Image: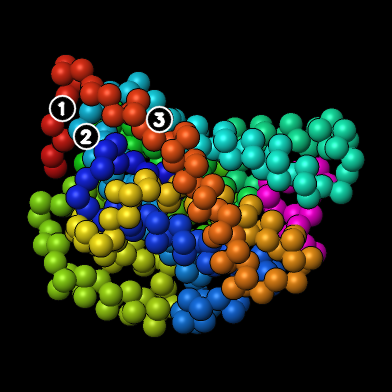
Amino acid sequence: MPNSTPSHRANNFDAVRLLAALSVVFSHAFLIAEGTQSREWFVRLTGNQCALGLVGVFVFFAISGYLITESWCRGPALGRFASRRFLRIYPALVLNTAICALLLGPVVTSLPLPEYFAGPELRRYVWNMATLWPGPLTLPGVVFSHNQVGWHINGAMWTLRAEAMMYAMVALLGLSRILRLSTSLVLLGLGIAAIYFEKYLPLLGPFNTWAWLLGFYASGMVVYFLRDRLEFDWRGALLALVALALFVWLHRFIMLFPLAGGYLVIWFARRYDRWLDYSRFCGDLSYGLYIYGWPCEEFVMWLSGGRAAWWQVFFGSLAIAVPLAWLSWHLVEKWALHRVRQPAPAALAAVAPGE
């Protein structure tokens, strides 16, 4: 998921996002290699409740809820807020779309190249990426392997539209002057309820994924508004870990994760462990790794003739995706962030609204 910090700071946010992205790639390696995640380590640990990559998504959304709320409260100007969010998501996504559609697709497709480029499916893929369509995303004649996900170009895209909806939600709440703790607590409750009643979520149409992820995002919002009242220390982190273990035992890990997971994620992200500060040397690779991980894993699977084991898919994909994430950061993302970092006019500065 996109990084929302406008400048490098002494905290662990970059490292936590990188770990979350790696967890997503790790879980997808099982799905892409075996067509199922039933043997993934965290799935087995939690009694088939949750994959590690899904926890990575929860982490991304909790961090985003915290930082995006902070961003609006620090500078509540709709135009600037929207441009920041756009520049963080789209420039890197445009490059990713071009690489998948114009390089990966032509290499893998079973169609003649003129037919590949002339067909409507290619244009539909570009349009779906531009509109953050959650998928399934396909390219003409592209099949990486013969399992249930072997024709997916990028199975990680399902969260981006929900992320953009969360941005819009924060802006609407801010413009309505109700972006505060009480509202965030209501959203947290609604998000937990949405997972409890998830069989009814398809009735929400395009908002079903947003509703399913709402609790995780709202957990970050709640922690933001309580940041000066909470004690961020190892005792709270230990209590949160015990609570998460209890949620596993209750077979409600996903539904109840926001009640403890949000605190745990933000506690660790707010710390500063210098040895984890990798982005000082190579930039923030988390978003690039997230959007390139799946296509690179599928490409490794295709190169193996559909026979690669999960660990071969995982490590092989990292050998390709990490350099692509580095290029994405240095060629696109940091230049977009440079525009984000331009100071807002003094007249737009505002104090975060209190409860």
Spatial CA span between label 1 and label 2: 7 Å
Give the percent coordinates (x, y) of residue 2.
42, 44
Evaluate if marks 3 and 1 touch, with contact meaning CB atoms under 8 Å apart: no
- Viewed as shown, does residue 121 lie left or right of 330? right
- Viewed as shown, does residue 148 lie left or right of 111? left
Give the percent coordinates (x, y) of residue 209.
52, 50
Give the percent coordinates (x, y) of residue 327.
50, 42
At label 2, counting other C-alpha atoms closer than 10 Å, the crowd grade (few under 14, some 14-19, many 20 or more) is many
At label 1, counting other C-alpha atoms closer than 10 Å, the crowd grade (few under 14, some 14-19, many 20 or more) is few
Q: Which mark is residue 350?
A: 1
Residue range (magenta) = 137-153
Evaluate if marks 1 and 2 touch, with contact meaning CB atoms under 8 Å apart: yes
- Viewed as shown, does residue 258 lie left or right of 306? left
Inspect the magenta stretch and tell me whether residue 142 lies in it.
yes
Judged by its main secondary structure, the magenta piece is loop
Upstream in the sequence, badge 1 or badge 2? 2
Q: Quadrant of the C terminus?
A: top left
Amino acid type, residue under disc 1 in the picture: Ala
Upstream in the sequence, badge 3 or badge 1? 3
**Nearest to viewer (mark 3 / mark 2):** 3
Spatial CA span between label 3 and label 2: 24 Å
Q: Secondary structure at mark 3?
A: helix
Report if residue 85 is visible in the image: no
Spatial CA span between label 3 and label 1: 26 Å
Q: Secondary structure at mark 2?
A: helix
Amino acid type, residue under disc 3 in the picture: Trp
Label 2 sits on residue: 73
Quadrant housing residue 354: top left
Label 3 sits on residue: 335
